[in-house]
Amino acid sequence: MFTKDIYIQRREQLRQSVQSGIVLLLGNGEAAVNYAGNDYAFRQDSSFLYYVGLDTPNLAYVLDIDNQKEYLLGNELTIDDIIWMGHLPSLKERAAQVGIETILPFSQLSSFTDKKRIIHYLKPYRYRNQLLLSELFNKKVDEILSSYSIELTKAIIQMRLIKSAEELAELNDAGQTGYAMHIVAMKMCQPGVSEREIAGVIEGLAVSRGTRVSFPSILSMNGQTLHNHDHSGILAKGRLMLCDAGAENIHHYASDFTRTTAVGGEYSQRQKNIHNIVLKALNDSIALSQPGITYKSVHRNAYKIIFEGLRDLGLMKGGTEEALNAGAPALFMPHGLGHAMGLDVHDMEDLGETWVGYDDEIHRDTLFGYRSLRFGKRLEPGHVLTVEPGIYFVPQLIEKWEKEKINTDFIHFAEVKKYLDFGGIRLEDDIVITETGCRFVYEKRLPVTVEEIIHATHS
């Protein structure tokens, strides 16, 4: 939790950003794993955390724009709550910690649903909140999901995208734990070790230093599957282990790094070749990221580096601009270069990925690969982003493109098919845009060259 003044200032800025009506921010409730009372670890809604800061379930915040009043709604703990879950300060005391004076029972939320006034709420992603709003406004869930406030959504995105010094300190903290997780993974990347064991150790490290992992860890020799959460493999000599993992610190800020390590630290020449192309795409993308540049253009430049690198290896052919315009490099990198990061590892994507990553100036492309870029906006100081180029050999995608004769002018399919057992390589760092360029969110960069990673596996 930050200081009271920070939350007051944020809510005042929000009040000035919304023209009229009532703003309703719902906190999250508990969610059962397999029966009531056996719950998933509680995670507060990130926008509620940003403006209210209270990390307990079943709360709501109401901001009356027109009358310049605000309310915290919730229920005091019962004796049963205290027996089973422990004692907390009163709701009034907790509200005072974040500068809210007026508290009301949660049941009084319905008193703010005056149909004559505009009620601004965010699109709910939890079923509990969907049903709550459905009952509150006497509308079907489909209507609730389609009538959320775009004005409020845009106002919150505009605020949350620019990270304050206090937030950057939290992100640095999350990065420190993420760094430690990846160093452990590199050391454990030895023949005969199970993927599940490594995933379990690094996820335990995240819990021991914060609250949890910032997303389910991706750790697999089958790195060609972009979000591979299957940890059933046993590491084998000659294979690569892709590890995409991060931590969420105690204040719920995220980190997100990826490194790809040769099992036992022994790289073949072709593994080194592909690694070095991805590394150049990573380093050049970081160097290009500065205020005024669109991240969409940085993504395209990463494709340029991948195309020209693979062309040098004999896997691609033809002219660079023609290949980029045709989307040919997307065979090898079918995802976007990166995404915003903050209180969410994919920051604010519950508010709408397109609202977060695009605007009236910069629109999402429709071409395969390009359309997967989550964030394409013009960069501003305070933006926090991941940079994560990769090269993957997905047998099914390669087979489809060859069969359908997609981009045959730019791809040597006969040569590409020699890599069907390769897997994939992704390298990812977290950056913050500064006034003059960018820097790493966590100042100490993970080993990233082949030589540095080899050293890490043996140290």
Image (spheres, rainbow, N blue to C red):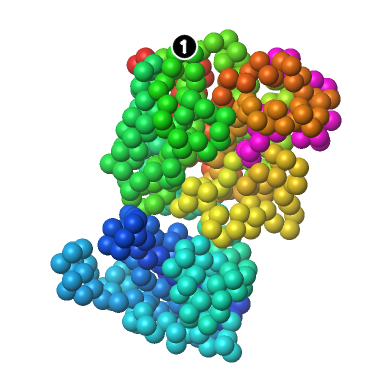
Q: Is residue 249 above or below residue 114?
A: above
Q: For the point 72% across and 36% down, which residue is it?
A: 300
Q: Nearer the viewer, residue 51 or 318?
A: 318
Kind of residue at disc 1: Glu
Q: Where's residue 376, x and y in %?
A: 67, 47
Q: For the point 74% across and 52% down, which residue is it?
A: 363
Among the 4 quarters of the image, the one containing residue 404: top right
Q: For the point 51% across and 76% down, which residue is it?
A: 134
Q: Which residues are magenta?
A: 313-337
Q: Nearer the viewer, residue 73 or 264?
A: 264
Q: The N terminus is located in which quarter?
A: bottom left
Q: Where's residue 191, x and y in %?
A: 39, 16
Q: Is residue 154 magenta?
A: no
As helix, strand or loop, the secondary structure at mark 1 comes to loop
The residue indicated by pointer 1 is: 266
User: Left or right of 424: which side holds 317?
Assistant: right
Q: Is residue 431 visible?
A: yes
Q: Is residue 5 visible?
A: no
Q: Is residue 203 above or below residue 260?
A: below
**Crowding at mark 1 (Cα within 10 Å: few <14, some 14-19, many 20+):** some
Q: Nearer the viewer, residue 137 or 14?
A: 137
Q: Where's residue 282, x and y in %?
A: 60, 29
Q: Where's residue 48, x and y in %?
A: 44, 65
